[in-house]
Amino acid sequence: MENLKLFKNSVVSKSFMLWINNYPLSYHSLDMKRFEKFVIALFINNEEIPDNEFGHYLMEKCNFSSKDVEYFKERISNSLSLLNTYVELRK
């Protein structure tokens, strides 16, 4: 699947493509692990998801439903919040 340069950082982009080019909607543990690595790459590289472009890309290029898009956007938001809290507590 083509990468539309959704992300500035190449590590984030590669981790996103690794997740999306497999079976992201299977919710299989390996696919969710790839998703988690993508979220961690977002966090480590201090990059945000391009909100409108991200959802559009997932629906148009990856056949996600709007419900799937909202699920993963919420997972990203919750995961990033958890990671931020973890970092704050470690200080």
Image: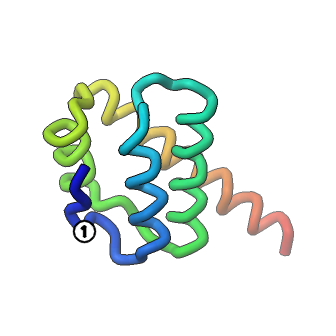
Instruction: Tell how many labels.
Output: 1
Instruction: Kindly identify the residue that appears in the image at 26 percent across and 52 percent down.
Output: 54
Compared with residue 65, is residue 16 higher up or lower down, i.e. above or below?
below
Compared with residue 6, is residue 10 higher up or lower down, i.e. above or below?
below
The structure's colour scheme is rainbow
Q: In the picture, residue 86 is in which quadrant?
A: bottom right
Q: Nearer the viewer, residue 4 or 68?
A: 4
- Image spot of residue 48 (x, y percent): 40, 65
Is 59 left or right of 86, judged from the image as shown?
Answer: left
Is 61 left or right of 41, judged from the image as shown?
Answer: left
Q: Nearer the viewer, residue 15 or 59?
A: 15
Instruction: Kindly identify the residue that appears in the image at 23 percent across and 29 percent down.
Output: 66
Query: Which residue is the site of mark 1?
Result: 5
Q: Nearer the viewer, residue 39 or 83?
A: 39
Characterize the local packing of mark 1: few (<14), some (14-19) or many (20 or more) Cα atoms within 10 angstroms. Answer: few
Is 13 left or right of 83, judged from the image as shown?
Answer: left
- Image spot of residue 77 (x, y percent): 49, 48
Callout 1 amino acid: Lys
Residue found at the very far right of the displayed protein = 90
Q: In the picture, residue 47 is in which quadrant?
A: bottom left
- Image spot of residue 5 (x, y percent): 25, 68
SS at badge 1: loop
Instruction: Kindly identify the residue that appears in the image at 37 percent across and 44 percent down.
Output: 21
Q: Nearer the viewer, residue 49 or 91?
A: 49
Compared with residue 24, is residue 20 higher up or lower down, i.e. above or below?
below
Of the 4 image quadrants, the one containing the C terminus is bottom right
Instruction: Kindly identify the residue that appears in the image at 42 percent across and 38 percent down.
Output: 22
Residue found at the very far left of the displayed protein = 60
